[in-house]
Amino acid sequence: MEQIEPKHSSAANFEARTVRDIIEPTRSIFNNVSVKAALDEMQARAIDSSPVIDQRGELLGAVSKNKMNREVGGLGHDPKTEPVEAHMGTNNLYCFEDQTVAEAEQMMLNANVGEVPVVTREKFLVGTINIDAIAQDRKRRERLEPFKYRA
């Protein structure tokens, strides 16, 4: 997993929104389930990838349907007994819940990803943030901005 630490400006904006303000709930897959169980869960939720957590809720990585199908089916492994953890990517981006939305947005734009998991400083998964939610939040705040200075 990769996390880029923010560069803090001395002129910090104390009104800056944090990721916690626009976080969205997420579901994840436990690291000790089989590939078949993970694929069935992802199929039922109509998703192509999912964060992977341990029993405590700590983010360990992510899995994708395509990668698991290629690696398990292509190599002749039994998906009912093959552990999902063996096919988990661990060099994925994530952001912290106390980072600013602007920091998360810049990280996502730099990496060309549309969504990242959100974790606590202890790396416990708390949700996701996506580029669309950031854009919607920005538009909503811009519409409300004229009312901020009215008497």
Image (spheres, grey):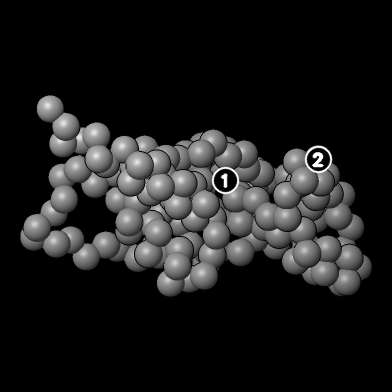
- Label 2 with label 1: CB-CB less than 8 Å: no
Question: Residue, x 25% and y 40% (percent of image)?
Answer: 146
Task: Name the spot of residue 20 as percent of width and height, x first.
Answer: 37, 39
Task: Name the spot of residue 5 as percent of width and height, x first.
Answer: 29, 63
* Numbered disc total: 2
* Element at label 1: strand
State the residue position of label 2.
44
Q: Nearer the viewer, residue 72 or 67?
A: 67
How crowded is the residue under tag 2: few (<14 C-alpha within 10 Å), some, or many (20+)? few
Q: Quadrant of the C terminus?
A: top left
> In the rendered image, is residue 124 in sight?
no
State the residue position of label 1.
53
**Residue that extends furthest to the top in the rendered view of this protein:** 151
Vertical order, 65 against 54 (above or below): below
Amino acid type of the residue that numbered disc 2 sits on in the rendered structure: Ala
Going from the N terminus, do you reach mark 2 or mark 1 first?
Answer: 2
Q: Nearer the viewer, residue 69 or 48?
A: 48
Vertical order, 44 against 100 (above or below): above
Question: Residue, x 45% and y 52% (percent of image)?
Answer: 135
Question: Residue, x 57% and y 44% (percent of image)?
Answer: 54
Amino acid type of the residue that numbered disc 1 sits on in the rendered structure: Ile
Q: Nearer the viewer, residue 86 or 37?
A: 37
Task: Name the spot of residue 99 as percent of width and height, x first.
Answer: 31, 50
**Residue that extends furthest to the left in the rendered view of this protein:** 10
Task: Name the spot of residue 35 as percent of width and height, x first.
Answer: 79, 52
